[in-house]
């Protein structure tokens, strides 16, 4: 058992914090920008809530966060009411936000200067993975604090891995999102082709999912794509945020991402048609409704 805080109770953070309490038996203090969500979490899981990240971080062994983007990470870490203002020396901050490698390195340096530890630990597995405690957690930072924090992360992660120095977790998540973008577009094109060709595409899925084309997207999104169901899962708005991070990093490191850039524009079209909160599998919607 440890004293931990969790900052940010969105669709990912809410169940992740819940697993820390239920599976790990940790004493959890939560913070959320909308206080009603924090009150709801406490009513469901126990623990307590705090009015600011600074207040939530007092006396904790580990502070977790899962917020929106780079500026949100900066605010909950180094802002006037940020957690770094009250964390005791040697405390570990684990950021599960999908953000840039740049901000991860920035917060790592700020933490080190304050006698703290910072780990960037973006996750993959979506809302279902968070709710089932089966996330993949990709971490960057130092080995000693990672080893101390890993048992707590195991409460919501089925695979928790240190990928390298600060920023390596975020870079690994970028690889993840780049691969997903291409997979979803290819799956959409294949299924749309099958429908145009007059095939029973549900049967097609059953057959090809047993071969080399198999993927998580095919297994979990193929049939809902056929049915035109997109009101769930990882939202297009979030994917575009992630892909823009990937494209910006590619501009810095010289990597070529022609397919990723193209799929990003397809997602922009989904947004323009009002599909901001659709699941990312909505790419097939563009092919079926041209």
Image: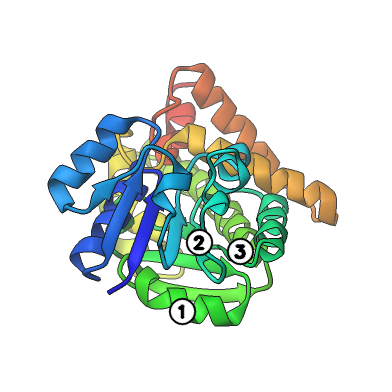
Q: Earlier in the sequence, mark 3 or mark 1?
A: 1
Q: CA distance from mark 3 to mark 1?
A: 21 Å
Residue 148, numbered circle: 1
The crowd level at tag 2 (other Cα within 10 Å; few <14, some 14-19, many 20+) is: many
Q: Residue at x 56, y 23 (%)?
A: 269
Q: Residue at x 48, y 43 (%)?
A: 67
Q: Is residue 193 above or below residue 134?
A: above
Tell which of 222 and 201 is nearer to you: 222
Mark 3 secondary-structure assignment: helix
Question: Can you identify the residue that label 3 sits on?
Answer: 172
- Left or right of 21 in this view: 85: right
The crowd level at tag 1 (other Cα within 10 Å; few <14, some 14-19, many 20+) is: few
Q: Residue at x 14, y 47 (%)?
A: 44
Across and down, in percent, residue 84 comes to 57, 53
Q: Earlier in the sequence, mark 1 or mark 2?
A: 2
Q: CA distance from mark 1 to mark 2?
A: 11 Å
- Left or right of 78 in this view: 152: left
Tell which of 218 and 27 is nearer to you: 27
Mark 2 secondary-structure assignment: strand
Q: CA distance from mark 3 to mark 2?
A: 16 Å
């Amino acid at each position: 058992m440890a004293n931990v805080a969790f900052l940010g109770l969105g669709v990912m953070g809410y169940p992740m914090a819940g697993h820390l309490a239920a599976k790990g038996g940790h004493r959890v203090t939560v913070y959320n920008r909308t206080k009603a969500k924090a009150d709801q979490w406490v009513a469901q899981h126990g623990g307590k809530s705090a009015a600011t990240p600074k207040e939530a971080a007092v006396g904790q062994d580990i502070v977790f966060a899962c917020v929106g983007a780079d500026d949100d990470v900066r605010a909950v870490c180094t802002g006037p009411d940020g957690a770094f203002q009250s964390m005791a020396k040697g405390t570990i901050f684990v950021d599960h936000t999908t953000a840039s490698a740049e901000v991860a390195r920035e917060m790592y340096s700020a933490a080190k200067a304050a006698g703290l530890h910072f780990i960037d630990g973006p996750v993959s597995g979506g809302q279902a993975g968070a709710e089932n405690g089966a996330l993949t957690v990709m971490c960057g930072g130092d080995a000693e604090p990672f080893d101390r924090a890993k048992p707590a992360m195991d409460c919501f992660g089925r695979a928790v891995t240190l990928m390298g120095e600060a920023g390596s977790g975020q870079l690994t998540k970028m690889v993840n999102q780049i691969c997903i973008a291409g997979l979803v577009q290819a799956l959409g094109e294949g299924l749309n082709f099958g429908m145009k060709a007059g095939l029973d595409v549900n049967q097609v899925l059953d057959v090809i999912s047993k071969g080399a084309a198999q993927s998580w997207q095919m297994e979990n999104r193929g049939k809902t794509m056929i049915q035109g169901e997109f009101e769930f899962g990882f939202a297009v708005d979030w994917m575009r945020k992630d892909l823009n991070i990937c494209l910006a990093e590619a501009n810095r490191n010289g990597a070529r991402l022609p397919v990723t850039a193209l799929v990003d524009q397809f997602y922009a079209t989904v947004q323009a048609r009002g599909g901001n909160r659709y699941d990312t599998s909505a790419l097939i919607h563009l092919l079926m409704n041209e």
